[in-house]
Image (spheres, rainbow, N blue to C red):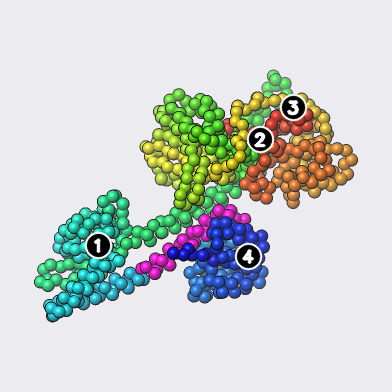
Amino acid sequence: MTTHRYKFLAIDDGEETLEQLQAGIAHTFPGADFFPARSGAQGIELALAKIPDIILLDVVMPEMDGFETCRRIKEDIRLKNTPVIFLTAVKPDAEICEKALAAGAEAFISKPFELWELLVQIRAMLKIKAANISQQTERAQLRQMVALRTHELAEQLALREKALESLKESEALFKAVFTESPMGICLLDARTDRFLRVNPMLARIIGRSQEDLAGADWMSVTHPEDIKTQSDSLARLNSGETKVLQVEKRYLRPDGSIAWVKLTATPLPAFDKTNPRYLGMVEDISAARAAEQERAQLEEQLRQSQKMETAGNLAGGIAHDFNNMLSAILTYSDLLLKAMGEDDPKRSDVEEIKNTGQRAAALTRQLLAFSRKQVLQPKVLDINMILAGMKTMLHRLIGENIKLTTVARKEPVLIKADPGYLEQVLLNLCVNARDSMPKGGKLTLEVSVARIDAEYIHRNGTLKPGEYALLSVSDNGCGMNAETKAHIFEPFFTTKPRDKGTGLGLSTVHGIVKQSGGTIVIDSEEGRGTVFKLYFPLASGEAAEAGQPAAVKKFSAVSGTVLVVDDDTQIKTLARRALSEDGLSVLEAGSAEEALTLCKHHQKRIDLLLTDMVLPEMTGIELAERLKAEYQEMEVIYMSGYTDHSVLTDGMLPPDKNFIQKPFTLDLLTQKVREALSPPATRAPAHAEHPLKNAKS
C-alpha cells in the first residue's frame, strides 16, 4: 500500500512567506511536493497543471488579488473540492469574508501566523477533504447498492406466488445478497417489532451473534434516546404516510460502546396479508460520525485559539500603556516619600498611592502573562528540583487541612523555561486547588515523562506524537462542569466571589505555559476533583542550580554616565531625575536614532545604556549592539513592560542579560543601575524579578 504524496500550492508575492511555508510543510509533510507562485496568473497555471491537494493563497497581490485567483481556480471541475486557505495581514471583516466565501475559500490564517496554527489548519482541511470525498463516494455506492438490491428483492418476492422457479431464484439471490452484503440487512416483524432474521454484517455492527438477535426486539439493542424517533417513523410507514423509512440511530453493543448507523426500511408484502414485515438496510456510519466530530473539535479549537489571541492582543496593549504610567506613579511616589519626614501627615496618603500602584502593576503583569507578551529568561530546569524547592512554601500556602503529596521521577526531567514564571504557574494552580477544597482534601503534584503515540486534539491545543515532560496537579475538590471548563482560561472569568480573585490566575497559567512551548489538558467533573496536566517539550543539557533565592543585596552609590533611551517622555524624565539625584550623569534620547546621533557628538565615555526594548524603527537590543562597537566596556540594562515577536522570539531573553520589568520603583531602578556599574565581583547573578507571585488568582 503506497502513502499518498501531498501536493501543496502556495501563491504569495512575498518571498519570505513562501520560504516560511515551504520550510514548515517540508518539516511536517516529508516528501510532499511544494509549488510556489509569486502571482495569481502563475498560481492558476500551476494549479491547472499540478492539481494540488491544498492551496495557500495571499489575499493582497498585485495585478490579480486572491479573490479573483481563487474564483478562477475553482472554475476548473478538478479543483472545485480543493481547499483554499487565505493568508491575510488584515483582520477579516464581513466584506472580506463574503468575498472569500463567494470565491470558494474555506478558511483564513492571519499574518504573521504561528506555524503550528497554519499546520493545524492544513491538517484539518486535508482530513476534512479526505473525509468528504470518502464519505461522498461510499454513500453514493451504498445508496446505489441499496436501491438496486431493494428493488430486485421487492420484485422477486412479489413473484413468489406466480412461479416456483422464480421463487427459488429469488430465494437464492436473496440468500447471496443477505449473507455477503457489506451492509447490515434484517427482516423485522411489523407486529412484534422482533427481528426475524439478520445477516452477518448487521450482527458484526451490533456486536452480537445472529442467534442472539433472532427473536430479539429492535428496541432492546437501540439507544434509549433513539427509540421514540424510530417508533414515530415506523408509525408513519404503517399508515402509508411515507413509503420508505430513513433514520440515523445508535445501536448499543454489549461492551457499552455505540454504533452509529443509517437505517433504511421498507414494507414487504405478506403471503396471507396478516404477517407484515419490514426489510431493513443498515449502513454503518460510525467512521463518518467520528470524522464529523473531529472536524467539530478542530473548528472549536480554532475558534478558541482566535478568541484567546484577540483577548491577548487587547490585554497586552492595555498592559503596555499602563506600565509606563505606573512606572511614573511608583517612582514619583518614592520621590515624595524620600522627601517627607516619618511624621509627615501626608505620608500615609502617598504610601497608599504607592501600594495601589503596586497592586495595579501586579494586575498588568498578569495581563502580560496571559497575552504571552511578557519577557521570559528561560533556563534548562529539572522540574523535580523546582518541585522540591517549593514544597515547604506550598505547605504553608495551602494550609494544614490539605494533604500535599509530591511524586518526583528518579531521573531528571529537563525542560527549558523561566524558573520564576514556572513557580508562578505552580503557585496559581495550587491556590486554585486549595480554594476548591474549603473543608480540606488532597493535593498531588507529580512529575513524569509521557509518551504520546498519536496526535491528540483537545480544546486548548494539539499534542504531536513524541515524549513530553508532564507536570500533573490534581485535587479531590469540587471539580468543574462543562460550562466552566469551556471558559476556564479566559481572562476575568472566575467562579469565586468578587473580593477573592481577579479571574486572571488560570489565564496567567495558560499564557505562561503556552509561551514556554507547552500545552494544558484538563480533566474535571463536578464533585470528582480536577487534574491539570502540563505538557512541556523535553530539553537537553545541564539543569541550572535550584536553591533558595539569594538575599537582596544593597549596592553603594556609584559614579558614571548613563544614557537613557525610551520613547515615553515620563520614563525618560523620572529616570533622569532618579539617577541624577543618585549622583550619576544622565543623557537621554527618545529613539534609537536620536541616541546614535547624541553619541556621535558626545566626546566622553558612556558607562551604562538603560534602554527600552521596544523602540520605533530599531529595537533596544539592536541599539545596544551598535553602541557596544563604540563603547566596548559599556554595561546594558534592558527595560520592558511588553514585548512582541519583532523584538524577541516568543518573548525569550537570555538569562545573562540585565533586565528590569516595568513598572519599577525608584529603589529598584537605582539598585539595578548601581549593580550594573559596580565591580563584577560584587554583583548578583543576572535575573529578572517575578512580581506575579504576589498577585491574587
Residue 78 locus on image (x, y percent)? 50, 74
In the rendered structure, which disc, 2 or 3, sits on the residue that comes first in sequence? 3
At a point 67% along the width and 38% down the height, the residue shown is 655
At a point 58% along the width and 31% down the height, the residue shown is 694
In the image: residue 363, left or right of residue 462:
right
The answer to which quarter of the image holds residue 474 is: top left
In the rendered structure, which disc, 1 or 3, sits on the residue that comes first in sequence? 1
Q: Nearer the viewer, mark 2 or mark 3?
A: 3
* Amino acid of disc 3: Thr
Q: Residues within 10 Å of mark 2 (few under 14, many from 20)?
A: some
- Residue named by callout 1: 200
Q: Secondary structure at mark 4?
A: loop
- Majority secondary structure of magenta residues: helix
- Residue named by callout 3: 682
Residue 135 locus on image (x, y percent)? 39, 66
Between 264 and 146, the residue placed more toward the observer is: 146
In the rendered structure, which disc, 4 or 3, sits on the residue that comes first in sequence? 4
* Amino acid of disc 4: Asp
Vertical comparison of 463 with 55: above or below: above
Q: Secondary structure at mark 2?
A: loop
Stretch of the chain drawn in magenta? 111-139
Q: Which mark is residue 688?
A: 2
